[in-house]
Image: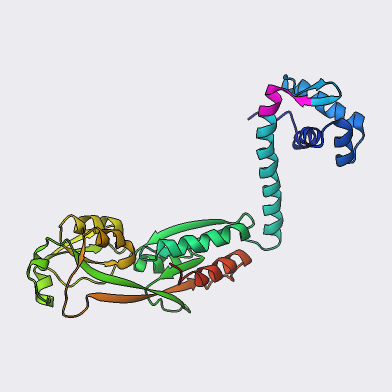
């Protein structure tokens, strides 16, 4: 790739001339001589092959090409400044990236609130967000690919911070055969019907929530499970916050079980125990806890 002929300092000089209203004013702002500023702009125009400024009266005015290039150069200068700030932060121990792994059942609204609060404090630190199901979160902690993890499982060897509970409810389409029984449902009633379950994304999956139904369909996501059940295919336990709209619109209805119709599962925040938390990771962890109870 051909090296740029115009330097960042030259673009900064052009910005100073335009923003301050002239060569003399720019020279004062930049603590340079007016002749040096004038030479820099002349050299830029020569290197680019297009006029950037034209003198109208005593004022330097941008040409049409100059307006376009100046607008693009502002983004360039901003990105360069952000890059320099990130390098400084890294030198001070600030992480360039936080890897966050979240169980798919964790409410997205709470996660979004925490990430939105983290953004102005991030100082250029990126967040790599990944969703897993059940033991998939544990696998990410164990193999070191997660700095922070939210899981509903108890993970041996890690100290959890309890953040909130998620309610799972038993549901089916209102026209499903289970609803037509018009009575409290037993374990035996459920075993005769198709159950939709979410695939555990871990290397050693568990059958959490499966009742041993004769027919079981396994899907990869909560959204797919909700869509299938709402269409009339089987029943499932799904996070109540994920199916609020389906319940309101009557595409899903709560099953009347003798017991277990609603299950509350606590979720926990874990941190990678093999390396100390950096400042950005600690800030994000604190925000996740703070916003864990928000709707």
Q: At 50% across and 56% down in the image, what residue appears?
A: 128
In the image, 87 versus 280, the foreground residue is 280
Q: Position of residue 44 (x, y in %)?
A: 78, 26
Is 40 drawn above or below residue 208 in the view shown? above
Number of numbered callouts drawn: 0
**122 left or right of 184?**
right
Q: Quadrant of the C terminus?
A: bottom left
As rendered, which of 146 and 194 lies closer to the eye?
A: 194
* Residue 62, magenta (yes or no): yes
Magenta highlight on residue 222: no
Would residue 187 be found to the left or right of residue 156 on screen? left
Q: Is residue 264 above or below residue 100?
A: below
Residue placed at 42% from the left, 75% from the top?
164
Q: Taking 35 as reference, is 204 left or right? A: left
Compare residues 224 and 204 and report the one nearer the observer.
224
Q: Tell me if I can see residue 207 in this picture.
A: no
Question: Quadrant of the rendered structure where residue 202 is?
Answer: bottom left
Residue 17 in picture, x, y percent from top left: 81, 33
Name which quarter of the figure residue 123 lies in. Answer: bottom right
Residue 193 lies in what quarter of the image?
Answer: bottom left
In what quadrant of the picture does the N terminus appear? Answer: top right
Magenta stretch in the rendered image: 61-68
Residue at image position (74%, 30%) is 6
Q: Tell me if residue 111 can be seen.
A: yes
Magenta stretch, overall SS: helix
Residue 24 image offset from top left, x and y in percent: 89, 33
Residue 281 in picture, x, y percent from top left? 57, 66
């Amino acid at each position: 790739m051909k090296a740029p002929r115009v330097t960042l300092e030259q673009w900064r000089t052009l910005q100073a001339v335009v923003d301050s209203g002239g060569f003399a004013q720019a020279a004062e702002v930049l603590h340079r001589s007016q002749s040096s500023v004038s030479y820099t702009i002349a050299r830029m125009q020569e290197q680019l092959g297009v006029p950037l400024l034209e003198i109208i009266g005593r004022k330097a005015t941008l040409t049409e090409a100059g307006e376009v290039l100046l607008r693009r150069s502002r983004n360039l200068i901003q990105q360069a400044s952000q890059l320099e700030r990130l390098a400084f932060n890294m030198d001070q121990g600030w992480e360039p990236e936080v890897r966050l792994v979240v169980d798919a059942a964790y409410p997205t609204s709470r996660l979004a609130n925490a990430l939105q609060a983290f953004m102005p404090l991030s100082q250029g630190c990126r967040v790599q967000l990944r969703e897993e199901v059940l033991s998939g979160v544990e696998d990410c902690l164990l193999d070191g690919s997660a700095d922070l993890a939210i899981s509903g499982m108890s993970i041996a060897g890690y100290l959890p911070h309890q953040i909130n509970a998620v309610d799972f409810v038993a549901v089916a389409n209102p026209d499903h055969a289970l609803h037509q029984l018009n009575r409290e449902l037993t374990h035996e009633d459920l075993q005769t019907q198709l159950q939709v379950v979410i695939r555990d994304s871990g290397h050693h999956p568990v059958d959490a929530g499966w009742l041993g139904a004769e027919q079981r369909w396994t899907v990869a996501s909560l959204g797919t499970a909700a869509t299938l059940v709402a269409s009339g295919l089987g029943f499932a336990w799904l996070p109540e916050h994920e199916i609020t709209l389906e319940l309101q619109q009557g595409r899903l209805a709560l099953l009347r079980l003798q017991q277990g119709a609603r299950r509350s599962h606590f979720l926990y925040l874990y941190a990678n125990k093999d390396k100390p938390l950096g400042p950005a990771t600690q800030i994000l962890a604190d925000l996740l806890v703070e916003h864990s109870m928000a709707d």
